[in-house]
Image (cartoon, helix red, strand yellow):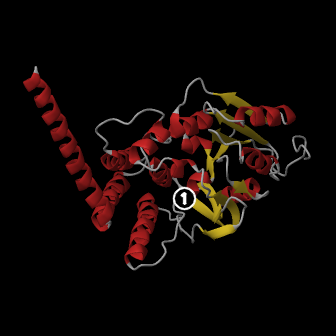
Amino acid sequence: MTNRTMTPDHDGRLVSIGLPVYNGADYVAEAIDCLRRQTHGNIEIIISDNCSTDDTPAICEQVARQDPRIRYSRTDRNLGAAGNFNRVARLARGPFFAWANHDDRWADSYIEQCLEALDDRRDAVLAYARSEKIDETGRTLLSLNANLRLGAERPSDRLRRYHDHFIAVDRRRGWGREPIEGFWIPVYGLVRTEALMRTPLIRDFISSDTVLIEDLLLLGAFVEIDEVLFYKRDHQDRSMRDSESYDARAEWFTGRAPSRLLMPRWRMIAARLGSAARLPQSTGQKLACLAEVLSFYVRRRSETNALVKEILANAERLLRRGDQNARVFEKW
């Protein structure tokens, strides 16, 4: 393909694209090719190989030799998905940043259109595009988001609008209708790096990407581009599908065996409340955002039920451990 390194842009700002990968040999070359074709050519592609055991290193090293915009490195140990995502973000040098998965696709104008959208909304911290889920061959399976409308002026209003989408998904399931997916898609949008670095990034518990989205919504508006420019690939070897049990998913996400006391839902509510308390806004908005977080758990019964189930499950686990220790003591 043509190397776009010297292609002049209407806008010379550097955009950093972080591509964390682990055993992605089947799709990573195609993903990198999509990034290299971006019409906004002033990019750096930061590839972090999380100790892959397949042909991923050879593929990435080859394309890095072909394009000086690509920086490839390999971790000394498996950092887990969260650690590897955070690693590429911290290595970013540009004022704008986007995460890229090794198995997804981007339209050639994705970065350019996101930049233009952020220029049009100076109060916005992130721009993303309408998206579709595709299969192994690239065939469209379904639409992933439908006008999330996260551009309100007040942080509490943006937060409530985002929470409303979770509740809408539950209602559609309750009515036996196919839920509208994609409220997590903005995490793959183009974000102002300065805003991203004011957050804790991806935390070390499952579904913390949605908490990161909420962190960013507290800092500024989101812009949705009304055109399909991002394609999320679903396939049999997808990481989350490959780790079906909770313990396996937790280990894939963090890079270590999960603790016996698994409290991800409680850690999530603590993270949400902590973010709202740190909000750099007026006291009134802090209180409004804290109230919205608590309201979300009242309005979304499934979240409340999950909190209760976690307490009961961990209490049962502690009781079993106590019984085992008692039996050992009796034998001794």
Amino acid found under the numbered disc labelled 1: Ala
Q: Quadrant of residue 285?
A: bottom left
Going 71% across and 55% down the picture, which residue do you hit?
105
Q: Nearer the viewer, residue 200 or 134?
A: 134
Tell me if 202 is positioned left or right of 67 in this view: left
Going 13% across and 35% down the picture, which residue do you hit?
323
Going 36% across and 48% down the picture, which residue do you hit?
268
- On the question of residue 92 being in view, the answer is no
- Say which residue label 1 marks: 221
Question: Could you say where residue 271 lies in the image, as x and y percent from the top left?
Answer: 37, 45
**Neighbourhood count class around disc 1 (C-alpha, 10 Å): few under 14, some 14–19, many 20 upward:** many
Question: Could you say where residue 174 lies in the image, as x and y percent from the top left?
Answer: 37, 75
Relative vertical location of residue 325 with respect to residue 130 in this rendering, above or below? above
Tell me if 157 is positioned left or right of 114 in this view: left
Tell me if 257 is positioned left or right of 99 in this view: left
Q: How many marks?
A: 1
Question: Could you say where residue 210 lies in the image, as x and y percent from the top left?
Answer: 47, 53
Relative vertical location of residue 148 with respect to residue 185 in this rendering, above or below? below
Q: Which residue extends farthest left?
A: 330
Which SS class for mark 1? strand
Q: Quadrant of residue 155?
A: bottom left
Question: Could you say where residue 278 lies in the image, as x and y percent from the top left?
Answer: 39, 44
- On the question of residue 145 being in view, the answer is yes
Going 52% across and 64% down the picture, which residue do you hit?
150
